[in-house]
């Protein structure tokens, strides 16, 4: 897919821009990654892998709650998201797993770490953990993607780089906004989330990265990955919002059968983004789970 700049992208991501944004940056093999490693020194580290669109700021309220529980957190933006590089590359699972792997290694995080993945990040987390079982304390999946079948229309329209590029340039922003409209049940929080994500999507290459991910990342028909993850010697828990309309909770029974999690929690009055919508509830669930399965003891 040829790189392009959408008409709504009126900013360029560079050193001067990044200087104005909180957080840290690190050069990895594919590009610069924006991250924050925060929380009490000596606390167990919780690594947070985000979904299709979100920047690291998405985790702010959850990380504050986890810090209060004595936990340290690593939040980061995937390539093409937030203030990480818009790389000209194939935005597939391998790219995002490599980013996570290199980030943990370069920051020399103490292991084992707790891994949390939400939506698309759940697929990244499972793929990462399958390669790093010994250095993983626990795995938590929140509203995970990958169990639905790819819509026939999407398969047709995003079947090659030419049609993908045309659609992305002409209606990419509209499709992004429609996607964001289904994420959060509370209208006020939905507006806050859209503003956070929308600001980052004003930078050149953002829509390109979004559609490259839709085209190349395996977001559908991932039962085999779930089944394999369920065989790993890692404590696993599942968290889902009852009103999730992006990765519908109707897949819960299938996920439980494939994944065989140690614990499963359904949060009432909550949509797709439980860490953002119910940070106190999610933090308490995580902290309790970590106390139960303390592999560093």
Image: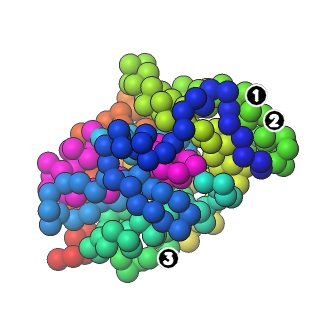
Q: Is residue 245 magenta?
A: no
- Helix, strand or loop at label 1? It is helix
**In the depicted structure, whether residue 154 falls above or below residue 139:** above
How far is disc 1 from disc 2 in space, using C-alphas?
A: 6 Å
Q: From this view, report whether residue 186 is shown above or below residue 261.
A: above
Q: How many residues crowd mark 2 within 10 Å: few (<14), some (14–19), many (20+)? A: few
Q: Which residues are magenta?
A: 61-86
Q: Position of residue 283 (x, y in %)?
A: 25, 47
- The answer to whether residue 266 of the structure is visible from this angle is no
Q: Exactly how many numbered labels are in the figure?
A: 3
Of 271 and 249, which appears nearest the observer? 271
For image coordinates 31% across by 43% down, the residue present is: 22
**Residue 7: which quarter of the image?**
top right
Residue for point 54% across, 38% down: 12
Q: Are marks 1 and 2 in contact (CB under 8 Å)?
A: yes
Counting residues from the start of the chain, the first of labels 3 and 1 encountered is 3
- Corner quadrant of residue 222: bottom right
Percent across and percent down for residue 163 are 84, 40
Q: Is residue 91 something one can see in this rendering?
A: yes
Which secondary structure, mark 3?
helix
Q: Where is mark 1, residue-wise? A: 170
Residue 131 image label: 3
Residue extending farthest to the top is 187
Q: Where does label 2 land, which residue? A: 166
Q: Nearer the viewer, mark 2 or mark 3?
A: 2
Residue 41 is left or right of residue 202, and the answer is left
Q: Which residue extends farthest front?
A: 16
Q: Earlier in the sequence, mark 2 or mark 3?
A: 3
Q: Position of residue 128 (x, y in %)?
A: 49, 68
């Amino acid at each position: 897919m040829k790189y392009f700049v959408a008409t709504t992208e009126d900013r360029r991501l560079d050193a001067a821009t990044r200087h104005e944004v909180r957080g840290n940056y690190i050069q990895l093999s594919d590009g610069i990654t924006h991250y924050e490693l925060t929380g009490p020194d000596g606390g167990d580290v919780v690594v947070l892998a985000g979904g299709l669109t979100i920047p690291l700021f998405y985790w702010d309220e959850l990380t504050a709650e986890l810090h209060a529980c004595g936990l340290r957190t690593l939040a980061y933006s995937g390539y093409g998201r937030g203030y990480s590089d818009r790389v000209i590359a194939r935005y597939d699972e391998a790219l995002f797993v490599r980013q996570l792997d290199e980030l943990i290694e370069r920051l020399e995080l103490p292991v084992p770490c707790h891994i949390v993945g939400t939506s698309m990040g759940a697929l990244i987390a499972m793929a990462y953990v399958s390669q790093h079982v010994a250095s993983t304390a626990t795995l938590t999946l929140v509203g995970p993607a990958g169990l639905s079948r790819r819509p026939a229309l999407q398969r047709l329209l995003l079947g090659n780089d030419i049609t993908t590029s045309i659609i992305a340039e002409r209606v990419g922003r509209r499709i992004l906004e429609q996607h964001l409209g289904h994420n959060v049940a509370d209208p006020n929080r939905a507006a806050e989330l859209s503003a956070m994500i929308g600001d980052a999507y004003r930078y050149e290459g953002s829509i390109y990265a979004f559609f490259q991910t839709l085209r190349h990342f395996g977001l559908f028909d991932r039962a085999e990955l779930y089944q394999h993850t369920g065989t790993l010697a890692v404590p696993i828990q599942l968290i889902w919002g009852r009103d999730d309309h992006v990765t519908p909770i109707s897949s819960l029974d299938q996920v439980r059968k494939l994944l065989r999690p140690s614990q499963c929690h359904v949060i009432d009055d909550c949509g797709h983004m439980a860490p953002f919508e119910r940070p106190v509830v999610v933090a308490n669930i995580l902290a309790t789970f970590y106390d139960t399965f303390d592999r560093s003891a």
